[in-house]
Amino acid sequence: MGHKAAELYGNRTMTNPTQSLYAARLPIFPRRVSGYFRRLKWALMLVTLGIYYLTPWLRWERGPDMPDQAVLIDLANRRFYFFMIEIWPHEFYFVAGMLVMAGLALFLFTAALGRVWCGYACPQTVWTDLFILVERWIEGDRNARVRLHEAPWSLHKWRLRISKWVVWLIIGLLTGGAWVFYFTDAPTLLRDLASFSAPPVAYMTIAILTATTFVFGGFMREQVCIYMCPWPRIQAAMMDEDTLTVAYRDWRGEPRGKGLRRRAAAEAAEASIRAAGPQIGPRSPVIPMPGRPAMPSAPVLTEHKGDCIDCNACVNVCPMGIDIRDGQQMACITCALCIDACDEVMEKTGQPRGLIDYIALSDAPKEAAGDQPKSVWRHVLRARNLIYAGLWSGIGIALIFALFLRPDVEMTVAPIRNPTHVVLADGTIRNAYDVRVRNKQGTEQIFHVSLDHADLIITVEGSTSDKIAIPADSQGQARVYVDAPAGSHLATHARSDLRLWVTDQETGERAAVDTNFTGKDDE
Amino acid sequence: MTTHKDDKDIGTTGHSWDGIEELNNPLPRWWLWTLYGCIVWAVVYTILYPAWPMVSGATSGVLGWSTRGAVAEEIAAVDEAQSGLRAELEATDLNTLAANEPLHRFAVQAGGSLFANNCAQCHGAGAAGAKGYPNLLDDDWLWGGQIEQVAYTIRHGIRNEDDPDARYSQMPAFGEILTRPEIDTLVAHVQSLSSGADPLAGAGGEMFSANCVACHGEDAKGNRDMGAPNLTDAIWLYGSDTATLTTTISKARFGVMPAWGLRLDEAEVRALAAYVHQLGGGEATTEE
């Protein structure tokens, strides 16, 4: 590194070659906290887990031959049911559209509110939150858990650990169990699972998801976000200086003080020290936190004291084990629990709330200079967000239109090209077509195949008529022969246009496909 | 971060570019153990499964698994699953096969695969035939288009020496019997039959009745018992141009088809018959 770079970036040292290249996970013991964002997160947990666990049990009447599960991904029959909507494989663009919308919604929320997905709605966050709740319920709050962690293994410790793991495993089992219900009729599968007659893949899926829920929620936790998940990297790229995100008002908090009462006590002590003359050396020993290197604290006595009393409440409640006062960092999932924790302390010390808050970075210099920040709405309703919202709703409206414009009868026609035509004994020219008809209705329908040429004869292979029967909610294929008598226009011309129709005998709904007729081209 | 360290506490790798340095954060320990676990897994895997290349072939693995074995197992499983349908197909009267929808579908699908393997070489992938090899899509049949007749043709073949029950007929080579001008007259006469000429009229008619009616009939519509083609229709196995017909009449044709009953089992022959019968020209069974 050159001198200039050294001046600019400071002098870092190369890692000591003897230093270990890997480190054990430092356990995190988030403290209980209450407040606005904690309540919001409880509510969201209730809603998201409720949706996840209960959706497969909702029923929706569709007809005698159709499944009555409201939300069902029927892989075996290649159908997706969502209440009144039924999606066939060829309508996969609905799924693609929904995924594009999900992506755009993520862009929108990230641009407006930072990593709000990570902090509130991500399954990893929600289940970890639930697992920490169980942990606190069984082992106690932060201090009790730290003590238990440091205590030697005893009957008591084993009892607490095993009961915690059992509850975690039950949650994991329910999570994996709920997953498989989305793919087949839930009540039937539950009966089969209980009587051990369900397909092995169901048990395998439940086992895998139980294991991942147990390990990710119980043990991996923040490691999943930091080391395994790609979202933090991607989302960081979608934020800008107008994004509202969880941050620390360092211009208000620094330099860190010790709180009003302790400050008064310290000032009294300082006064006695000052009376005794100048001194050198640390004045306020820092209480070491478990698993954390000691932090140099600010001198107690300065002209101006910041609002931060360095109580570490924001660090203690953090499920990611970070210090938000260090600034924006990749490990922060913006769960906002530090806001609640700090507000609690600010209230106790009689200072204004919001030392840690949702702040846009562009407002920081203004606020620091004592100016009024931009309003929340001006942050949210900026061009970038409006474009995302516009695209999102545009695709949504297009999908809704497409949903209602879907025909009930659809046909595809594949002309047989090997051979292009067949000469029959009487000189008739025959062309064959593979006709696929989709019957999207809940009952079997008879379809009548026709042409708009009167002199052509149409027959359906294996049938004496021009009718195709297609069972309920399925696709049928038939080989259709079109015969042009010898000498007719179509028989004597190399290539002619032809339009094939299918008509639902009962409803009269029609579908047409344009194709070609190949005649004898040597006459 | 779980390290709780300020950036300044973390060393660098010593790599620096434009003043941007690479921090040397330690790996999580579980990550390292995952790597070791994968290595152990890989070693165990190479012991259990075929892996290490040797001079002739690879180590076979203690589980004895192989891709060929897996395919053989799958084929055996499919054969096992189909054995009921095959037995049913062998026992069913072919004339009523089409009424049994699932069995008919199975026969047609199986027949399609068998056709591609055994028949497409001569009759073409689309069954449209070629010069000398009949088109199976049309409604013209040399030996009959009812499903039992088709099955018989497939089972015993035509003019082969392997099966005594093969369909057999032979047209004389008229080049050794008639003079060249007589043959020219006959060729012209046969060509005219397609457009509705009287088979027995004129000079050609006289020769036709003297030489051809025994097999092709007085109406020239052929005789399926002898595999004699219908000469009045629009379909010509070898072609209807003068040169081709001259060759056909003077040298005669002798198309051969193998007896597939000697190579395929009865269920396969029946499946092929069902497939060919539904290609567009199959004839309904009539009471004899």
Image (cartoon, rainbow, N blue to C red):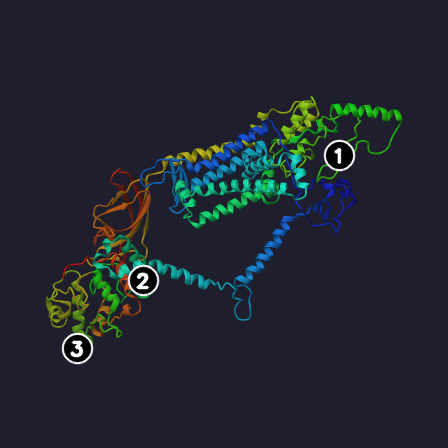
Residue found at the very far top of the displayed protein: A350
Gap in Å between the C-alphas at discs 3 and 2? 40 Å
- Which subunit holds the residue at mark 1? A
The answer to whether tags 1 and 3 share a subunit is no
Q: Which of A315 and A32 is in front in this view?
A: A32
The structure residue drawn at horizontal position 75% and vertical position 37%, both measured from the top left corner, is A294
Q: Nearer the viewer, mark 2 or mark 1?
A: 1
Say which amino acid is labelled 1.
Ile
Asked if marks 2 and 1 touch (Cβ < 8 Å), the reply is no
Say which amino acid is labelled 3.
Ile
Query: Are there few (<14), some (14-19), or many (20+) residues within 10 Å of tag 1?
Result: few
Asked if marks 1 and 3 touch (Cβ < 8 Å), the reply is no
Residue found at the very far right of the displayed protein: A277
Gap in Å between the C-alphas at discs 1 and 3? 124 Å
User: Label for residue B177?
Assistant: 3
Work out whether A378 lies above or below B59.
above
Say which amino acid is labelled 2.
Phe
Whether residue A358 is visible, yes or no, is no
- Expressed as whole percent of the image width and height from the top left, the position of residue B208 reads 13, 70
- Expressed as whole percent of the image width and height from the top left, the position of residue A114 reads 59, 34
**Mark 1 — residue?**
A287
Label 2: state its secondary structure. Answer: helix
Label 3: state its secondary structure. Answer: loop
